[in-house]
């Protein structure tokens, strides 16, 4: 849910790469804290050919000094933040989004987000026979792919995993591909629909 505002607002697709740093883990225990540095292809809504997205988890907070933006430890947590050229948008996991620098957006009213209820969307789609719902697979697939690729990257700290979305493979660290799927027990195989 925390990456969703970025994917929605910026029309992101699958990442090009991800690098993880964390406080330590083993085969049985996930890290207590981690930072994931993604690189996504740029879109019509971004300023360059690529977009850097950083995920901080487990109490890790960014250390920044950006004009008009409060210190990271004073902001609502958990949240997503878009840092733009002319302003910044904080989107809390719950609550109302906030624009910074506050003085530049004084009096600005955020647009009504409209219907944002994926439970009703799902029921409406089933009743109407229309799969084009707000959480459809064309959108949710790349979002989930990015999150899961971050989970794989945590197993390879400090190493950038380069991702080929067309083949669903890590291209530069072949051993990472072993974590992309598994062998299912007989009778529990996942069958692709086509």
Image: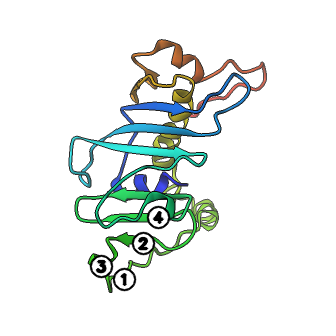
Per the image, label 2 sits on a secondary structure element best described as strand
Q: Earlier in the sequence, mark 2 or mark 3?
A: 2
Q: CA distance from mark 2 to mark 1?
A: 10 Å
Label pair 3/1, CB-CB below 8 angstroms: no
- Residue 98 has which mark? 2
Q: As drawn, is 168 to the left or to the right of 65?
A: right
Q: Which mark is residue 103?
A: 3
Which residue carries the number 1 mark?
A: 109
Q: CA distance from mark 3 to mark 4?
A: 18 Å
> Closer to the camera, 6 or 64?
64
Q: Is residue 158 above or below residue 78?
A: above
Q: Which-is-in-front pick, marks 2 and 1?
A: 2
Residue at the image point whose x is 34% and y is 76% from the top: 102
Left or right: 185, with 48 as reference point:
right
Q: Secondary structure at mark 4?
A: strand
Which badge, 4 or 1, comes first in the chain's sequence?
A: 4
Mark 4 neighbour class, 10 Å CA radius: few under 14, some 14 to 19, many 20 or more: many
4 and 2 marks in contact (CB < 8 Å) = no
Q: Quadrant of residue 77?
A: bottom right
């Amino acid at each position: 849910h925390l990456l969703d505002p970025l994917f929605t607002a910026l029309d992101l697709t699958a990442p090009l790469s991800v690098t993880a740093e964390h406080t330590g883990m083993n085969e049985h225990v996930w890290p207590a804290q981690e930072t994931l540095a993604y690189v996504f292809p740029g879109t019509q809504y971004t300023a360059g050919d690529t977009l850097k997205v950083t995920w901080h988890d487990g109490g890790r907070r960014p250390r920044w000094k950006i004009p008009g933006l409060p210190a990271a430890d004073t902001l609502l947590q958990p949240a997503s933040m878009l840092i733009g050229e002319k302003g910044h948008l904080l989107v809390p996991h719950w609550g109302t989004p906030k624009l910074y620098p506050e003085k530049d957006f004084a009096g600005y009213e955020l647009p009504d987000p409209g219907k944002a209820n994926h439970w009703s969307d799902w029921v409406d789609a089933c009743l109407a026979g229309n799969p084009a719902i707000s959480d459809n697979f064309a959108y949710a697939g790349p979002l989930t792919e990015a999150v899961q690729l971050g989970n794989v990257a945590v197993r390879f700290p400090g190493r950038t995993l380069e991702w080929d979305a067309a083949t669903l493979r890590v291209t530069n660290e072949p051993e990472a591909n072993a974590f992309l799927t598994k062998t299912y027990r007989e009778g529990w195989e996942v069958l692709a629909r086509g």
